[in-house]
Amino acid sequence: MAKKTQAAAGRGAGSETVRIGIIGGSGLYNMPGLEKPREVRIKTPFGNPSDAFIVGTLEGKRVAFLARHARGHRFTPTEINYRANIHAMKQLGVERIISVSAVGSLQVDLKPLDFLIPDQFFDRTRHRVSTFFGDGVVAHVGFDKPVCSQLSGILGAACDAAKVRVHRSGTYICMEGPQFSTLAESHVYRQLRFEVIGMTNLTEAKLAREAEICYATVAMITDYDCWHPDHASVTLEEIISNLNKNAENAQNVIHEAVRNMPADRTCKCGRALAHAIVTDPSVIPAAARKRLSVIAGKYLTPGAR
């Protein structure tokens, strides 16, 4: 049994400082090979994360693993507390997040059991809170390139090393769910030339950018959505079967990516808020300043900009 520790909001996790975070989606609820794992439960100003973090050593590096839907798959995509999940990663010291997610394919050449590293997202959600800001503080981060190119490149190379068929770019359309697409919706998404469809990653990407954390996705293709003539409808049995097949590949890719992760970040993700906050620091409410201290504290002090 992993030892349990706790970290309160704004205090970090002491000896549990890590630089790499892993978010496991459907089918990936744990991280085999993690040495000396410890459960760390973290409190945030935005509520509780999906589950305890499992912090340990993987390929010689400290990592934190979180099951997005919780162990046992207890949260729908809309119910996930994305803000708490990303805030807790920031408290732990995470600078890069590898997100693993099950998706449906919208193109014939993107086959079930293939992986795709998206470089774009399209938002079809309706009920998500996707910013840390508001209630006295306004920020507009750049999001034209929604994933970290350096981290995406590392994940693509990791797929090659793990001998997983990978597509290195494409658009991930993020739908609300939890229902799957109608046939009409699926055909429209194909006409718009989107590559894959999922229910979770865009919200994470937006919050990670605000938290100045590098973020990239390994999209594991489980099915052809419902548009394919030989796949008239998506069944849960089909998806679960492919999830299980994908899980081992995903674990191998993560091991390769962590093993080859460079110490330095060469991207701009770590400076995403530098010119994003438009509110005059002198008028920011004390409660907002406290709530955002972990995310943007260095930018909220009068005279900081």
Image (cartoon, rainbow, N blue to C red):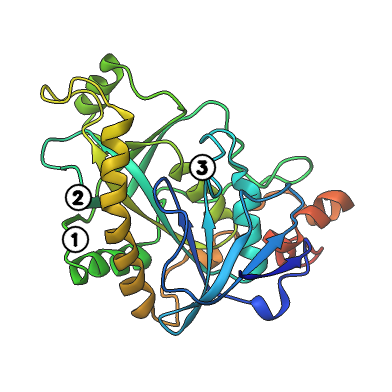
Residue 2: image x %, image y %?
61, 70
Residue 116: image x %, image y %?
25, 51
Residue at numbered disc 2: 114
Which residue is situated farthest in the front direction here?
A: 1
Q: Earlier in the sequence, mark 3 or mark 2?
A: 3
Please tell me in which quadrant of the rendered image residue 108 appears.
top left
Q: Earlier in the sequence, mark 2 or mark 1?
A: 2
Residue at numbered disc 3: 73
Q: CA distance from mark 2 to mark 1?
A: 7 Å
Residue 282: image x %, image y %?
85, 55
Q: Amino acid at mark 3?
A: His
Image-based side of 218 in relation to 56, left or right: left
Element under label 1? loop
**Circles 3 and 1: CB distance less than 8 Å?**
no
Q: Earlier in the sequence, mark 3 or mark 1?
A: 3
Q: Quadrant of the N terminus?
A: bottom right
277 versus 188 height, above or below: below
Element under label 3? loop
Residue at numbered disc 1: 164
Residue at x 75%, y 66% (from the top left corner) = 7
Q: Quadrant of the C terminus?
A: bottom right
Q: Amino acid at mark 2?
A: Asp
Q: CA distance from mark 3 to mark 2?
A: 23 Å
- Pick whichever, 205 or 178, lies toward us: 178
